[in-house]
Image: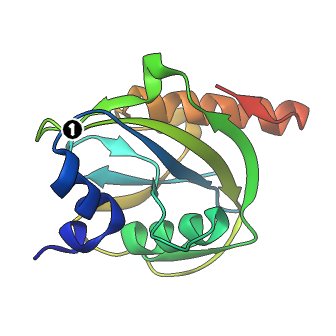
Amino acid sequence: MSDFAKSYLGRLRGTVGSRLLLVPGMRVVVEDGAGAILLQLRSDYGVWGLPGGVPDEGEGAEAVAIRETEEETGIRIADPLPFGFASDPAHEVWTYPNGDRCHYFTLLYAARTFSGELIASNDESLRVGWFRPDALPDLMPVMQRTLDAYGRFRATGLFQSI
């Protein structure tokens, strides 16, 4: 049985199939001291994105942000700061390659303090790397929206709702 099949969401999928689920999520913008952004080449879509994921049973939002970032990139963040919330169905309803559908209600975090080494790859990430904001690879559109919201947050200090 795969790790996903054992997870809360995997067990729920086993019961409800591919129908639309309303799912809490966390997405993380990790920025290094030079302003580079940490991205992962996602194994599910084959496109670059930000680390993130969904909670396991009994897990809080901050713990999810820390765990998912480390699982997907090898980097362990400290002191993640919530900067926004994403729930617009035009952007946060995802259909996965296997047909599963989710409408995500995603708390957006930023982290500038971290430790660890980048992983080479794993089941979720084909590659991981740091990218300057002016030289980003092709991103999933929802990830670009998140980075745009992060830029507005950095400029204004205002919590972003996208």
**Kind of residue indicated by mark 1:** Tyr
Q: Nearer the viewer, residue 134 or 79?
A: 79
Which part of the image, by quadrant, shows the C terminus? top right
Q: Residue furthest right?
A: 157
Image x and y of residue 91, in percent: 45, 23
Quadrant of res 80: bottom right
Quadrant housing the N terminus: bottom left
Is 149 left, or right, of 39 in this rendering? right
Check disc 1 and report its element: helix, strand or loop: loop
Q: Position of residue 86 (x, y in %)?
A: 59, 33
**Front in this rendered view, residue 143 or 5:** 5
Let me know if residue 113 appears in the view.
Answer: yes
Q: Residue at x 20, y 39 (%)?
A: 100
**Can residue 43 be seen here?**
no
**Which of the two residues, 139 or 92, is positioned nearer the viewer here?**
92
Which residue ends up furthest to the bottom in the rendered image?
116
Residue for badge 1: 96
How many numbered badges does the structure rendering display?
Answer: 1
Give the answer, above or below, for where 157 lies relative to 128: above
Residue under the point 66% across and 66% down: 62
Horizontal side of 133 relative to 47 (left or right) equals right
> Can you say whether 60 is above or below 41 in the image?
below
